[in-house]
Structures are given as structure tokens and as C-alpha cells.
Image (cartoon, rainbow, N blue to C red):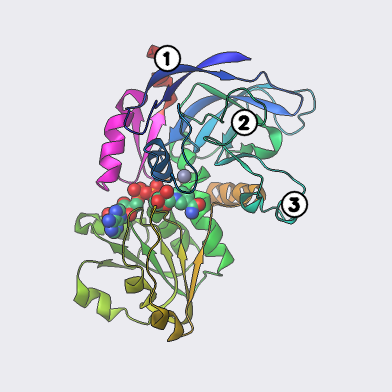
Amino acid sequence: MYKTKAYSAASATSLLASTKIPRRDPTERDVQIEILFCGICHSDLHQVRNEWKSIMPTVYPIVPGHEIVGRVTKVGSAVTRYKPGDLVAVGCLVDSDRTCPQCKANLENLCPNQTLTFNSPDKHKTAAVTYGGYSDSIVVDEHFVLRVPTNLDLAGTAPLLCAGITTYSPLRRWGVTTGKKVGIVGLGGLGHMGVKFSHAFGAHTVVFTTSPNKKEDALRLGANEIVVSRNADEMKKHAGGFDFILDTIAADHDINAYLNLLAHDGTLTLLGAPEKPMPVSAFTLLMGRRNLAGSIIGGIAETQEMLDFCGKHNITADVEVIPIQKVNEAYERLVKSDVKYRFCIDMASLQSE
Ligand code: NAP
Ligand code: ZN
């Protein structure tokens, strides 16, 4: 075991602060990674503040972070795919049982015994729970380590590991392509990646936002149209027109307003994870035989496919790079939807702690 610098929160009401955490020495299948950048996902904030207490209560101290890009510093004797110096990435998963039907189908994201990158029981018992990417280094089983295309900006690549795969996977799963009309609801970290991918897949892409000041950006990111969702007349114009809608809103909202926008047999897939259940009007689903679905990140093979797609098409997240000392300020801005479009921590800033 060794110690590494990190930022952690001690309770749901504490700020994140500098600390030291244990990491295991790499076992034969492990890759040790020096973390260069880590994105800030709204899920980090939900969990630091214990907003998912009814589903997955937070164990404190918590070290969040699951959008990790770094450089390999050491590998175990059985590691075959990576060597020291390689640029690699780690997303939301660091382990799974590898024996269940989902794991066998490359859907580790649906494994009932998965280990999340932070706030999951730590099988290696290095600590009570796993600790995430707001830290200097991490040790991860080779199977859960991804290769980073060398042409991409590293800070802009980190958010691909959650915001990227979480939007890429459902857009692929529900066949988004040329000729389809797609809605992306919420222009934050997930939403802006959803726009980039929907556009890259050739769909007519419409952004729904509560922030009129994001209009120019939405068009630049690849949207064909933008709708201010608080304007009832604008919403009405789109009723019944969509093949597919991705809902990325992080707070309580009326999903019926978006279900109404689906064409018959259209699907609305929820990605956002507000704590409380949201009421659904049966009639909105019945009329038009509409589908309401959910999706969670993606499997490891698909995450690599997404990274390779981004390398080929030069797609990265739009990031505001911050030193870790500004992480608490960033959280306050995230709550206010004031981020264009992902905060990304430059982990070199941890050296001065
Ligand atoms: P984010 O950057 O904060 O973006 C969320 C966006 O939702 C905001 O930018 C805002 O967009 C919109 N929004 C916020 N509050 C709203 C409200 N009260 N009413 C309507 N719209 C509102 O968050 P994120 O990192 O993209 O994450 C979004 C959600 O997805 C979170 O709940 C997160 O936990 C969840 N998530 C799920 C998965 C998964 O696998 N399913 C993975 C990662 C994250 P506008 O300003 O454009 O309105
Ligand atoms: Zn995330």
C-alpha cells in the first residue's frame, strides 16, 4: 500500500479538502496511473452531497471523480496491453464479476456486481470504499483501463469517460442516424456531448434548454435548432415530431412535457438522475405507443469504440480547466448550470498541497 494526494469530503455538508489516501500496490493484473486530468460530473456532486442516499448512500470520506486521463507509471507482471508511459483513461467502472450474462455480452455497466470508481465497496480492502480521480494516482485492473487516441487534447478527453460514453451508448442503441429527428434536453456536460454525437451520426438535432444564453453555443456544437423549454409556444411547435429524445436534466422536472414531443413509437431515454421519482402520465405514453427508457454509461468495449470514434472525428468535450483548489466553487456553479460545458481539473495543481 502507498499514500497519494487527493481531495475528499468528510460529510454531505463539508467542502472538498486536501487529504492523503491509500492506494494498493499494483497486483499482477493492475495498471498504476499518474492522473493528469479529471472531469467534474454532476454525479460527483450528487454523491458528495449524498443526494442519492435512498439508492446508494455515500460513505465518507468520499473522493469523487470518474473521468480520468493519465499516464501509466507501473504495470503488473500479467498486464499485456499497457506499458509505462502509455496515455490511458478510466471511467465510471473499475471492476465487475466478469461471469454474469451482461459481462459476457460486454455490458459491464449492467453487471449486478460491478465496482464503481468511487463510493463502491473496495474488493481489495485498501479502504472501505473505492476512491476516485480527484487524486494523484490510481491503480486499476487492466480490463477497465482504456487507451487514449494520441491526437486528442487530454483535458477535453477526460469527460468522454463519462459524459461521452453515457450519451454515445444510447444514441447508438436506439439507432440515431441520418434522417432521424433527435432532441437533447439540457445543455450541460452530458447534453453538449449528446449534441456532438447526434450531429456526428447525421441526425437533425434539436437542443432543449432553460438557458437562452446557450443558443449560439448549441448551434456551434452541432444543433440544427434550439428551443427554450420554458416557452410553451416554442415547445408546442415540436409536439409529436421526435424519433428519439435524450433527457440529461439533473434536477426534478416534468418529463411529460418531453414525452409529448415524441412521434409514435418514439423513445425518450433518461440519463439524468434526480433523486425523487417523477410522475408519468399514462395517456402520454399510450397515445402514440411511446417508449420511456433509461441508460447508464456503457460497457468497456463500447467505451473504447467511443474513444476511437472521437479520435477519428476529432471530438472532445468543451472544458473549463481549473486547479483543484477551485473545485468547491465549480460545484456551486454546476448547481446553477453555469458551466461551458464541463469543468476539468488539472491534477498538476495537487502538487502544491
Ligand atoms: P450538468 O452539467 O449540470 O448538466 C445538466 C443540465 O440540465 C444543465 O446544464 C441544465 O441545462 C439542465 N438543468 C439543470 N437544472 C434544471 C432544471 N431545474 N430544469 C431543467 N433543466 C435543468 O450535469 P451532467 O454532468 O451533464 O449530468 C446530468 C445528469 O445526468 C445528472 O443527474 C447526473 O448524475 C446524470 N448522469 C447520469 C449518467 C448515466 O449513466 N445515466 C452518467 C453521468 C451523469 P440548460 O442550462 O441547458 O437548461
Ligand atoms: Zn459521470
Q: Give the image location of residue 291, x and y in percent.
A: 49, 75
What is the span of residues highlighted in magenta in the rendered image?
Answer: 318-345
Q: Secondary structure at mark 2?
A: loop
Q: In the displayed structure, would residue 52 be above or below residue 212?
A: above
Q: Nearer the viewer, residue 304 or 326?
A: 326
When asked about the image quadrant of residue 273, the answer is bottom left
Q: Give the image location of residue 163, x and y in percent.
A: 46, 48
> Looking at the picture, which amino acid does disc 3 mark?
Cys
Residue in the picture at 21% in, 74% down: 232
> Looking at the picture, which amino acid does disc 1 mark?
Gln
Crowd class of label 2 (few under 14; some 14 to 19; many from 20; radius 10 Å): some
Discs 1/2, front: 2
**Which label's residue is closer to the chain start, 3 or 2?**
3
Crowd class of label 1 (few under 14; some 14 to 19; many from 20; radius 10 Å): few
For mark 1, what is the residue?
351
Residue 100's tag is 3
Whether pointer 1 and pointer 3 mark residues with C-beta atoms closer than 8 Å, the reply is no
For mark 2, what is the residue?
122
